[in-house]
Structure formats: C-alpha cells, structure tokens
C-alpha cells in the first residue's frame, strides 16, 4: 500500500518512541485513524470526551516519561480538551496532540467547524506546527517532539488533504533538547543560605524521586534548613521508608505561616512560591518580604544532580528513614478527612499509584500515606478540576501491573466521568473513590476568604450538588464499572481492601 501523509506522521511518532494514542476522532481524522491502526507498535484507546483523552495522555506520560499522542477533531475538539492540556503544560508533561484540520483548499469556505486551531493551541502548547504538504509532515513531527522532549505540549495540525495525499520519505529522528543543569556559580551561595538561620530548600520537578527525597532529607539534617516541595508536584515517589517531603500548603494563610521564618529560599527545580489566587489584604508572593531567592536549578532541570552536588559539598549522608504505623480508624466512625487518610494509608499496596484530587478532604491523606508502602503520588499542578479520573486511566495504561487509586471530589468527577467507560472498556485496574459531600465545598470556603461574604440563599444552590443528589453507584454501573457506597470507616476499609485485592475498575462512593 502506498504511504500517505498520515502514515508518515505515525511512523515518525513510533520511530521516536511514541507508542500510545488516546483518541476522539471525527471525519477530518479518518486517514490519521487508519494510519494509527495499521502502524505496528502504536496502541489506541477511545475516549468519549476530549478532556478524558488529553488527561489520559498526561497520566501516561507522567508515569513513563515519554509522550503519548492524542487525536482530536478540529478546533471544537481541541477546545474540549484544553483544560487538561493546561494541566499537562503546568506539569511539564511531554504530550503530543494530532489535530485534524479541513483540507487546505476547503478552508477558504469557512465551513461550520472551521476555527483558529493554531491560536487555540498556542495557549497551551510549547510548540505548534501545521504542515502544508505531505513532504513536510515527518520533519514537522520530529521538530515538535524535539521541542517537548524534556516536557511540554506539542500540537501538530494536519490538514485533511495533507493526511490523504501520497508521501515520500522516511521517518525523521528527533534530536532531544538538553535539560538545564544547576548553576555552578550559585552553589556556594546556596550552601551559605541553607546553613544560615531561615534557610529553606524548595524542590520541584516533573518527578520527585526517592533519591531526591533522601538527598533533601540529608541536606536538611546537615544544615537545619527547612525543606519543602512545591504545593502541587506532578509526580512524587513516596512511602516504603522514603523520607517524607512536606509540601507548601495550598491555601494562602497556612502557606504564609509555613514560610514566615524563611530568610533565603534556594529553588531547586521550583518556581518562587505564589498564592493560587489573589485575596484582599493577603500577599501574592508567599515568601516574606525581603527574603532572598536563589534559583539553583531551573524548572525542568537536573534536580537530582543539583541535590547530589549540594549533599556532597556539605558531606551530608543519606540515612535510613524509619516508618511508623498509621492507626486504624474507629470502624463505626463517620468518614471525614482524617478517617479517609487512615483508611487509604492502611490499605495502599506496594507499587500503587495515587492520583489525588481530594481537594477539601485530602488534608490528612497525603501526610499519612508517607507511612504506607512505596508508591507514586500524582497531583494537579494546573488547578483545572476534572483531571484525576483521566490521569488515572492514563497512568494505568502506562503501568498495567500496578494498582491505581484515584481519589476525587464529586464535583470534580462530574467534569470527566466518561473516563469510567474507557476504564471499563480497556479493563484498567483503577479504583476510584468519589468523595460525595454533595457540594463544591471549596467555593463555600473561598467566598468569604476572598471578601465576597458568606453564601446566601441565592448563591448557595450554585455550590450545591443536592436536589437531585447524584447516584455515583448507578453512574458507574451504567458505564460498566462495579460500584458500591460506604458511609463508615469500617465499610470504607473493607471496600478498599476488597478493591486492592482484586483487579479491574471499581468505584466507591464515599459519603462524607
């Protein structure tokens, strides 16, 4: 069979290690879909909503370090996937979008689905390309891959005729970008700052490894410096006697409290901490006024290497961390944030992947799970809700031999509940905890903090998921996922134990 432009795109992706595509295609992507299907080495997963596809690609890449592809239909399809592309961009996740476009000669007629795809893509992409001939597609694909090899979203827009016309040539190998290293000139200043009163080390990375946590702990013990991870980390290796890393708190008041004694902050792969939102009478920058900021290693850089240099210069030695056991909750207790944390920490199996979108109910879960067996923890760096179930789908696709636990608020889960169908269809080993407080509770917390007063009768319904209350058991079962509802600590513990000892997708609605 003669090769066309679509074939050359897919062959170039496979040649460069892209082996998974999450798809929601339409008419303009049929040649791309055919090429994806007939190219050896490329696997496909259908997602019923574009935001599930983009989130799944994010989760896949966070666990593998290599991009997954996403196939999207024209501008509206891309727009549907943009929220989770925003999250992927903030997480520095390598991700490759393929977006179908009208044929080059058809664009002049402003057909109903015509849109400024390049303009949309530029808002969430590190690199965008629209090849105009089949001869350009391999080079454009390889160039985009090179631009996001160390993290970032790439978007290839493929006009329909460019996809279907014959194409000569072979796949092109992408030349990866070099990752930034630590600033040698800053090492001495960083050492002095960390050894002085008020020194702090702030760590950020697409993946904070166990070794990074061990080195940070050794540096802290040697210098007395405070060590914190960024508020949201794309992926962190934890548990199994890994020294726990505290995160900068999400909310502005506890964050400023945690940082109030800092006089100099050494940033290692992290950005200077700022508040999630502006609040009247509260600072946007979280470090105290006058605190020095020392950028040792740029975001996306060689964080582990920088920490190795600091530890070696200090003579700081890694020592074993001894875990403690998390006490069980009273089986008859109602489920609150603390009970949730205890039950998850006590049932998490070795090698699990936790995707955390617990929001208002997650305060105890993260620190308690530091005492669990070794696992990976995934957070939402971009802040756009509805990320967790798609990311869990992608993480399970990347690591089918590992248990994935997705913990999400019910409000967040509604954004991308179609992920349940893909979990069932692809037989992914994901357990979803839907924390059913029947509200967007975080908004009720935020409204007075931002100076808008307490909710009133007219605004309260916009923060409530009552009347009707969603039935997550039926919603899950309707998409092929086994589900149950629990309301006590004992029931939650038993449900988690059953889920962790079985395979396949399950949903547990947790009344809170």
Image (cartoon, helix red, strand yellow):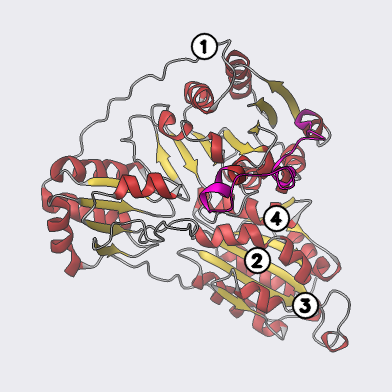
Relative height, residue 221 to residue 452 (above, below): above
Nearer to us of marks 1 and 2 is 1
Main SS, magenta region, reads loop
- Which SS class for mark 3? loop
Q: Do the residues labelled 4 and 3 touch (CB within 8 Å)?
A: no
Q: Along the polypeptide, which appears first: circle 4 or circle 3?
A: 4
How many angstroms separate mark 1 from mark 2 (CA)?
A: 48 Å
Q: Along the polypeptide, which appears first: circle 4 or circle 1?
A: 4
Q: Along the polypeptide, which appears first: circle 3 or circle 1?
A: 3
Res 115 label: 3
- Which SS class for mark 2? strand
Res 51 label: 4
At 73% from the left and 44% from the top, the residue drawn is 414
- Tell me where residue 413 sits by quadrant: top right
Across and down, in percent, residue 269 comes to 34, 59
Nearer to us of marks 4 and 1 is 1
Label 1 neighbourhood size at 10 Å, few (<14), some (14-19), many (20+)? few
- Image quadrant where one finds the N terminus: bottom right
- Which SS class for mark 1? loop
How many angstroms separate mark 2 from mark 3 (CA)?
A: 16 Å
Name the residue that disc number 2 marks. Answer: 97
Q: Along the polypeptide, which appears first: circle 1 or circle 2?
A: 2
């Amino acid at each position: 069979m003669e090769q066309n432009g679509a074939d050359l795109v897919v062959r170039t992706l496979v040649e460069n290690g892209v082996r998974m595509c999450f798809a929601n295609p339409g008419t303009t992507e049929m040649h791309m879909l055919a090429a994806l299907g007939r190219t050896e080495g490329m696997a496909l997963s259908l997602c019923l909503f574009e935001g599930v596809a983009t989130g799944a690609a994010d989760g896949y890449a966070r666990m593998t370090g290599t991009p997954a592809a996403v196939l999207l239909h024209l501008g509206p399809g891309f727009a549907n996937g943009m929220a989770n592309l925003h999250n992927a961009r903030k997480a520095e996740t390598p991700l490759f979008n393929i977006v179908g476009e009208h044929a080059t000669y058809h664009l002049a007629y402003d057909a109903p689905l015509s849109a400024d795809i390049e303009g949309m893509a530029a808002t969430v992409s590190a690199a965008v390309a629209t090849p105009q001939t089949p001869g350009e597609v391999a080079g454009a694909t390889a160039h985009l891959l090179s631009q996001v090899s160390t993290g970032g979203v790439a978007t290839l827009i493929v006009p329909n005729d460019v996809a279907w016309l014959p194409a000569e040539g072979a796949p092109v190998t992408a030349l990866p970008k070099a990752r930034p290293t630590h600033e040698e000139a800053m090492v001495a200043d960083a050492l002095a700052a960390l050894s002085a009163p008020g020194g702090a080390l702030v760590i950020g990375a697409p993946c904070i490894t166990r070794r990074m946590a061990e080195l940070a702990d050794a540096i802290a013990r040697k210098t007395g410096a405070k060590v914190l991870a960024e508020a949201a980390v794309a992926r962190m290796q934890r548990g199994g006697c890994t020294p726990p890393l505290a995160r900068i708190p999400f909310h502005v008041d506890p964050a400023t409290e945690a940082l109030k004694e800092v006089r100099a902050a050494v940033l290692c792969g992290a950005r200077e901490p700022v508040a999630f939102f502006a609040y009247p009478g509260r600072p946007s920058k979280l470090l105290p006024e006058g605190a020095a900021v020392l950028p040792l290693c740029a975001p996306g850089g060689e964080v582990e290497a920088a920490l190795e240099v600091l530890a070696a210069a200090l003579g700081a030695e890694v020592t074993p961390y001894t875990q403690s056991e998390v006490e069980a909750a009273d089986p008859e207790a109602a489920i609150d944030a603390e009970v949730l944390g205890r039950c998850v920490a006590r049932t998490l199996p070795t090698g699990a992947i936790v995707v955390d979108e617990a929001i208002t109910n997650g305060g105890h879960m993260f620190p308690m799970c530091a005492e669990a067996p070794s696992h990976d923890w995934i957070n939402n760096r971009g802040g756009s809700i509805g990320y967790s179930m798609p990311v869990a789908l992608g993480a399970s696709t990347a690591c089918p031999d590992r248990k994935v636990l997705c913990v999400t608020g019910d409000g967040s889960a509604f954004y991308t509940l179609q992920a349940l169908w893909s979990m069932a269809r692809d037989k992914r080993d994901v357990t979803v905890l839907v924390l059913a407080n029947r509200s967007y509770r975080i908004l009720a917390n935020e409204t007075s903090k931002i100076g808008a007063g307490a909710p009133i009768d007219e605004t309260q319904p916009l923060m409530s998921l009552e009347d009707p209350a969603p039935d997550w058991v039926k919603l899950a079962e309707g998409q092929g996922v086994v589900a149950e509802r629990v309301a006590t600590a004992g029931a939650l513990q038993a449900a988690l134990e059953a889920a962790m000892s079985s395979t396949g997708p399950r949903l547990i609605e947790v009344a809170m």
